[in-house]
Amino acid sequence: MTIAKRMSLWLREFGGAYCDNCLAKELKLSRSQEAGRVARALSKTANFYRERGICSLCGAEKKVTTAL
Ligand SMILES: [Zn+2]
């Protein structure tokens, strides 16, 4: 399964908005840049949204990704 597929399933299952660091941690990716790259790609599809906001996990204000 690709990282994009895993991330989209994970975001749908848990709901909420997540920063790249937390997505990397939850999906056990070695680098948060990888999570950011995949999250940006997902946000270009109609099913995901990416904007500055509060992360549901760590509470930091940064770019977060949400499943619509
Ligand atoms: Zn976070």
Image (spheres, grey):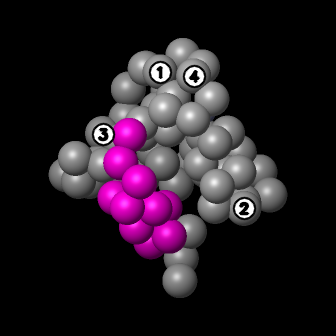
Image disc number at residue 49: 3
Q: Amino acid at mark 2?
A: Lys
Instruction: Give me the residue at 22% from left, 47% from top.
Output: 68
Instruction: Give me the residue at 71% from left, 45% from top.
Output: 32
Residue for badge 4: 59
The numbered mark, 2 or 3, whose residue comes first in the sequence reads: 2
Q: Residue furthest top?
A: 61
Instruction: Give me the residue at 30% from left, 39% from top.
Output: 49
Cβ(mark 3) to ligand 1 < 8 Å? no
Residue for badge 2: 28
Q: Which residues are magenta?
A: 5-16
SS class of the residue under badge 3? strand
Location of residue 35 in the rendering, given as x and y in whole percent from the top left corner: 61, 50
Residue for badge 1: 54
Q: Which quadrant would residue 40 be assigned to in this image? A: top left
Instruction: Give above or below for 5 relative to 58.
Output: below
Q: Could you tell me what secondary structure mostly forms the magenta stretch?
A: helix
The numbered mark, 2 or 4, whose residue comes first in the sequence reads: 2
Instruction: Give above or below for 35 relative to 2.
Output: above
SS class of the residue under badge 2? loop
Q: Amino acid at mark 1?
A: Ile
